[in-house]
Image (cartoon, coloured by chain):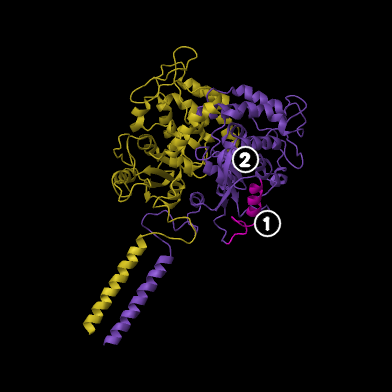
Chain colours: A yellow, B purple
């Protein structure tokens, strides 16, 4: 137990900071990829066993029928990157893998894209039970949080080090291909969760819609106008940030996103901080000002209506006083 | 895609009903075990691969060091039930398995027990990042949602049918042993999530604290008075049920739980519907009366303040009119 105490405490801390390792380590957003390059470990230990276990588990959970042969799927995946230079990576290398796994992904009817909202989006999707993120589909599920790269000598993958391949990482091409395939299959109403209070590592604000992000580069351009009826955008703001917000529906980069979607023939419906997501944020910060008004039967501590009430009452008193004065 | 659409729709429905298969199919609560006996499938397909994948994945996520040999752990698990009559199951058969896995479980400092609150408890624990349920520890994680039973002929486990072993299921003894081991290792403040609005299959109310549940039979009696400082009980009520509640802190079976804990030398701290958990319930039902007062900056759709405002304004107008009349 003693041996694991430190890393566990660290993970609890990471959890508090709303960073989940299995997710944050994954689809690196292009604009963030430079920071990912400090990572210099090799292929995830026991990659094949984790892949196979997750592949069978996914099929058990979602009752996939007819069953996909997970060993065959692994072979296609391994073939895409093994026996190559670790930086020789193209999205098309994974074509066979995606063909073999594509028809087994969960419902494409509640597709949830995300950018800059990794933790909240996945907590909300709830392993695909509420909404379906890429990581809740078979290809995303089996590789989520893992790392891999090829080698030109045996065992044909690099066990010790996955090198920097500027401007990105060796597994970036997989996530590009996965994002495209995911977007192409979306239908009906689709959902996008963005952050209106996103910052870079130096604390400088980042736009909610970044056209070089996975969403901007791979997903949005691959939405099928014949299949997608509406794009619902949720712009989330951290609880500690006080409005007015620089980035919100009808402001900043959201105008650009609206234009981009219109140009492609999609209807956009934008909502700032929808209540169901606000509640999810409040779970970890119930004492925040935006949360204390909430979820406690019968109590209401909001200031806004009181101010309005006082203003109206004051106006009535002033008018009445004036009437009294005029009449006397 | 067509082949998977029906089961997926079903799962979405199940999700809506707040029933997650991987969790609900697991530790059957003794008082519910009769209903589990309609289950007549055999050992989970690809049990060994799922076990191994999860075992390596768990160690990767929690950075377990030194690494546990998952193949060795599987051997100990398989030895406990294989080559036996499927109903020949005792918790002690798993002693070797628990010895080998025990020291690698996550932090015992934020232990969360649950009874009748499977879905909410696991959504809140968030894979062990917020709190640690049994299913967030290595032994619970690797077997969660799976099914197994032995056979006296090759391959020494039953692939086709796991029989009823009244009053329970073949894997019940595993979860009894797991619950005991989990409770024995808890320290500091521990937490228990119970349901104050629980019902059986006929809609008849069930007590929040059931002394024949896993919590009542295996966990509570195995808490170590030297290690556990306080037992914090959260009594949750479904949003659709209107108070007053039959079962709540200081009422019904919670009195019995308080007495039972006192008798064993533990301090109990009981809270009905703590706000952080109310928020989590509101995520799926934001329009519920308990939720609409909440988590929307600056806007307020509650009727209460408006009525008060109109009343005050009306009073001011009447008084003013009276003043005008008096003065003219």
In the rendered image, the quadrant that contains the C terminus of chain A is bottom left
Single out the mark in the foreground, 2 or 1.
Answer: 2
Q: Give the side of residue B22 with respect to residue A297, left or right.
A: right
Question: Residue B75's spot in the image, x, y percent?
Answer: 66, 23
Locate residue B154 relative to residue A278 in the image: left or right.
right
Q: CA distance from mark 2 to mark 1?
A: 35 Å
**Front position in the image: A211 or B153:** B153
User: Where residue B204 is drawn, which disc sits there?
Assistant: 1
Residue holding disc 2: B225
In the image, residue A177 lies at what x, y percent? 42, 30
Which span of residues is magenta-colored?
B244-263
- Residue A249 shown left or right of residue A68 in the figure: left
In the image: residue B123, left or right of residue A164: right
Chain where mark 2 sits: B
User: Pointer 2: residues within 10 angstroms few (<14), some, or many (20+)?
Assistant: some
Mark 1 falls on what kind of element? loop
**Which quadrant, please, contains the N terminus of chain A?**
top right
Give the residue at x 26% y 74%: A318
Does mark 1 fall on the same chain as mark 2? yes
């Amino acid at each position: 137990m003693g041996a694991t105490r430190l890393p566990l405490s660290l993970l609890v801390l990471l959890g508090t900071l709303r960073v989940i390792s299995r997710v944050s380590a994954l689809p690196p957003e292009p604009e963030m990829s430079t920071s990912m390059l400090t990572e210099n470990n090799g292929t995830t230990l026991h990659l094949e066993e984790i892949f196979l276990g997750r592949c069978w588990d996914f099929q058990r959970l979602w009752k996939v029928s007819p069953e996909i042969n997970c060993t065959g799927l692994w072979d296609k995946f391994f073939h895409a990157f093994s026996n190559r230079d670790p930086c020789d990576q193209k999205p098309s290398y994974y074509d066979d893998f995606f063909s073999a796994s594509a028809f087994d992904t969960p419902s494409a009817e509640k597709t949830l894209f995300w950018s800059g909202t990794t933790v909240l989006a996945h907590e909300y999707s709830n392993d695909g039970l509420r909404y379906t993120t890429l990581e809740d589909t078979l290809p995303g599920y089996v590789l989520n949080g893992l790392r891999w790269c090829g080698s030109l000598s045996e065992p044909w993958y690099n066990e010790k080090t996955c090198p920097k391949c500027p401007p990105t990482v060796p597994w970036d091409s997989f996530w590009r291909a996965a994002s495209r395939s995911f977007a192409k299959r979306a239908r009906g109403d689709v959902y996008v969760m963005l952050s209106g209070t996103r910052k870079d590592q130096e604390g400088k604000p980042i736009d909610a819609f970044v056209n070089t992000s996975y969403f901007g580069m791979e997903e949005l351009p691959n939405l099928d106008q014949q299949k997608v009826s509406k794009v619902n955008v949720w712009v989330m703001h951290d609880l500690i940030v006080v409005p007015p917000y620089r980035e919100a529906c009808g402001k900043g980069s959201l105008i650009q996103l609206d234009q981009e979607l219109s140009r492609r023939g999609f209807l956009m419906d934008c909502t700032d901080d929808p209540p169901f997501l606000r509640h999810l944020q409040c779970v970890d910060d119930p004492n925040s000002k935006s949360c204390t008004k909430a979820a406690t039967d019968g109590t209401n501590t909001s200031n806004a209506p009181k101010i309005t009430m006082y203003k109206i009452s004051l106006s009535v008193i002033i008018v009445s006083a004036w009437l009294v004065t005029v009449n006397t």
